[in-house]
Image (cartoon, rainbow, N blue to C red):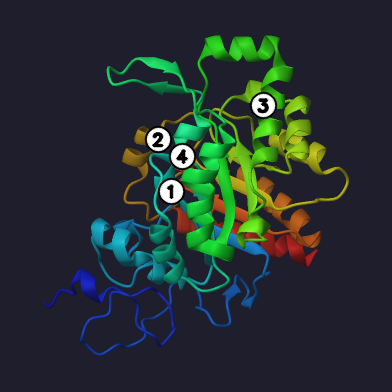
Amino acid sequence: MEHRTARSVKTRSIDPQPSLFMDDEAFSPPTPVLGPARPGLTWPGHKPMPSRLYLGTSSWNFPGWHQLVWDAHATESLLAREGLTAYSRHPLLRSVGIDRTFYAPIEAEVYRRYASQVDQDFRFLVKAPSIVTDAMTRDAEGRSRPNERFLDAEHARACFIEPCLKGLGEKAGVLLFQCSPMPASMLARICTQPAQFTQRIARFFSALPAPADLGAPSTCYALELRNTELLTPRLIAALREGNARLGIGLHPRMPPIARQASALAALDGDTPRGPLVIRWSLLPGMAYEEARQRFAPFKRLVVPDPHTRQGIADLAVTYLRAHQPVHIIVNNKAEGSAPRSLVALAEVIARGLEH
């Protein structure tokens, strides 16, 4: 029996153009698994997808998505290098999360290579480096100490914002600042003097360059928390002052979606006034490594969560009806398979828009 090599992998679509994995063999369009591909982008029911809806996964280099996103087997390393174009041809995947930037900044040229692999209407959600978003850092001996560059707007501009927008341009949908969990001692000080922390948040976002001034008028800044104690009316006021969005982070460390949706409503008032940013990251009560071992190779929904899915869809419908962009990134560790989660979510959003 002949085995297809990783270089012959194609995205699961009916687009008669080869993917980046095309070699010298003749190309024949594969049978679609999750629906037709662009152009004529559709979603459940074969209706036009709202142009402001950007659904995506937290990365794309998963060989287990064979027959879901990839037409043939491919290695993780090959997908990491070349899989983005194939990924972007999936009928629902108009966005993707870039997480590697959280661990170390990358240069504009790397962003530019990402941008060159996707269509003009594709959007990236990019995480800011932890050197800017972590309140604590570790020295060479592994000892924890306060991070002197925590919420340093000038450093964020130089190492993250300018290279990102120079490389991605208008394809940068969201620049996300995710604050890692703070130690109990620091949280205690913040909670006794909350105004100091929230004023620092407001000053940070107010000092960042406006994306429009860097050639990306549709890009927004968003803050995502990992400490429930920080989600207060003072913080919402600080985000409003800094013209930043509250990113809803669906993670065991944060409250359920209804509580975070209430905070977002306090930011916007009666009518949504900016983009909706949601990351569905991890099943409640589970750690990342535990979820990875349980859910790999990420081909099926292992633990479906229709309640959270409905909450996400309700928010998406509200913001779409208000003509605001909606950015939703889903991790494999949320239900077991990010592509299948997005198909199920799209179906719920479609039903909501029909009513």
Look at mark 2 in the image and give the residue it sits on: 288
- Label located before the other in sequence (2 or 3): 3
- Label located before the other in sequence (2 or 1): 2
What residue lies at 33% left-to-right and 47% top-to-bottom? 296
Q: Which mark is residue 158?
A: none
Q: CA distance from mark 1 to mark 4?
A: 22 Å
Residue 58 left/right relative to 307? left
Q: Which amino acid is tagged 1?
A: Asn
Q: CA distance from mark 4 to mark 3?
A: 18 Å
Choose mark 1 or mark 3, whichever is in front: 3
Marks 2 and 3 close (CB-CB < 8 Å): no
Residue 327 left/right relative to 20? right
Q: Which amino acid is tagged 4?
A: Pro
Q: Which mark is residue 332?
A: 1
- Label located before the other in sequence (1 or 3): 3
Look at mark 3 in the image and give the residue it sits on: 200
Label 4 CA crowd tier, 10 Å (few <14, some 14–19, many 20+): many
Q: CA distance from mark 2 to mark 3?
A: 30 Å
Marks 2 and 4 close (CB-CB < 8 Å): no
Identify whether 286 is placed above or below 166: above
Q: Position of residue 59 (x, y in %)?
A: 42, 53
What residue lies at 25% left-to-right and 64% top-to-bottom? 74
Q: Secondary structure at mark 4?
A: loop
Q: Position of residue 325 (x, y in %)?
A: 69, 59
Q: Secondary structure at mark 2?
A: helix
Q: Which amino acid is tagged 2?
A: Tyr
Label 3 CA crowd tier, 10 Å (few <14, some 14–19, many 20+): some
Query: Which image quarter: residue 102?
Result: top left
Q: Position of residue 174 (x, y in %)?
A: 59, 52
Look at mark 4 in the image and give the residue it sits on: 129
